Image (spheres, rainbow, N blue to C red):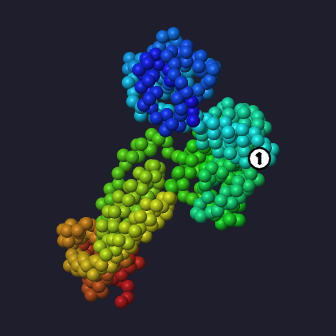
Amino acid sequence: MYKVLLVDDERIILDGISNVVPWQEAGTELMGTARNGIEAFEKIQQDPPDIIISDIRMPGMDGLQLAEKVSEQFPGIRMILLSGFSEFQYAQSAMKYGVRHYLLKPCNESKITEALQELVDELKQSEEEEDFIRNMRYGLEKMLPQMKEQFLKEFVTNKTYGAHDWAYYADLFSIDLGSRRVRLILFQLEGRFEFEHLFAVKNIAGELLEHPVLSSTVGDHVLMVVEDREDVSRLHERIEQIRTTFLHYYKIDLTIALSEADEITRARLLYRQTVECLNYRFYLGEGSLITPRDIVDVQSREAAKEWSYDDEKLLLQIKTGQREEAVEEIDAFFAKIGALRLDIETSKSYVIQLFMAVVRLADPERMNDYMEKLVKLAEMNTLAAIQSLFKEMAGEIALNNYDKHKNKHSAIVEKVTEIIEEQLGNPALSLNWVAHQMLYMNADYLGKLFKKETGEKFSNYVMRLRIKKATEVIEKNEDVKIFEIAEMLGFGDNPQYFSQVFKKYVGCTPSEYMKSPS
């Protein structure tokens, strides 16, 4: 139990708080009370408490003066100040004495209990840190490697550690960096692995890296600290060598994050930098080396959130069975998502929204299968894997739609060929004219459908048919004029263009063709 001293010049307040606060529930015991700061400090000198609860306005020595003296002579004691509303801003000046808990009067027992519990947690944490340091000292020679690992882990994850702690442990571990800066390297193992594989990574990295300072396992990651002595490109080469060596022996890939160079006392910030870099494996893929330069700055990321995707083109392609075109459009969509580098959840929300729109074009009986794929997609941790699954799903739906409407497509193309035969001499004959004037369809879609069915572009098909018809006319009537054939077959009053096209398809001009033997 942690001892508490209660200080207030009003007897009714002392009695009230003493009786209503569940001290034991908060992990404390009330060791005594005092009517002012002078009386309280005398008791503190005789038997220092762990926690002091004090009013701020008292005769003789007020709460702020008491906090100042306690801070100077008993810095380990925690304090809670009680103040009226008009005194609250004034009470905050006690922060320079280490006071971080203030309660407005009147306050109920739950508020006091909550503040006590927070201080108890702080005291326990402080004791744990002190115990940790004592344990570090014990058996130093034997436990030095493990101690270094534990220190690094605490140093980069515990915000209470700072420059003073580094100075102490650098001396303890005989680490002399001088003014040299460091970089942090964070390794993530991909797929299933055993705990022993973490130590294998650490050992390989320790052998291949120059100037290592400290290393540790942090959760499922391996963390290395190296001096920033060599060219960063050379460091990249060594990191890639670590990856390939580990992959060769253990068949497990590594994704690796490398921080910027900075002072060792900023290692916690550098560690957070490497963790953020590893998050970008979602975009860059497993087995990548990721640095802060690969991360889009926050302003760009905020601007990217305004982006929206128009899915009309893709949905039309899938609905009409244009599988290849749909796959190209999906690749373009994912390329844009990858370039934006939004946070992962935002990127996934764009993908899921498009996924649901595409699934609505599938057969109802396959809906459950595709919803299972959606669950799988949401759990994937790289954009490349999501893209692959998405294309597979969209391709299946597009192919199914094509097969389902194949007869309908063939009928449309057959109608187009009939129109071409009928309108072969019409100078206005074109894909747009047929689509808009004759069939009332989308010209782009009709053109792709025509090529898919015939293997030939609409314009090439028309021109080939016109030249074939021209040869037939010449063979039947040797006296026919070239300008007459041009007008007859839709070239209008441009016989010269007709002759150029004829030569391209037949290999000679219409005049030469007329003179050639049958």
Nearest the eye: 264 or 393: 264
Residue 106: x percent and y percent?
A: 38, 24
Side of 273 relative to 418 (left or right) = right
Q: Residue at x 35, y 58 (%)?
A: 353
Residue positioned most to the bottom: 518
Q: In this picture, is 408 found above or below 277? A: below
Side of 116 relative to 16 (left or right) = right
Q: Residues within 10 Å of mark 1 (few under 14, many from 20)?
A: few
Q: In this picture, is 199 found above or below 458? A: above
Q: Residue at x 39, y 55 (%)?
A: 349
Nearest the eye: 211 or 323: 211
Q: Residue at x 52, y 19 (%)?
A: 34
Q: Does residue 401 appear in the picture of this structure?
A: no
Residue 467: x percent and y percent?
A: 32, 78
Q: Does residue 137 appear in the picture of this structure?
A: yes
Q: Quadrant of residue 244?
A: bottom right
* Residue denoted by label 1: 143
Q: Residue at x 38, y 59 (%)?
A: 352
User: SS at mark 1?
Assistant: helix
Q: Quadrant of the C terminus?
A: bottom left
Q: Quadrant of the N terminus?
A: top right
Residue positioned most to the top: 60
Residue 425: x percent and y percent?
A: 22, 75
Residue 31: x percent and y percent?
A: 55, 27
Side of 96 relative to 493 (left or right) = right
Q: Amino acid at mark 1?
A: Met
- The number of discs equals 1
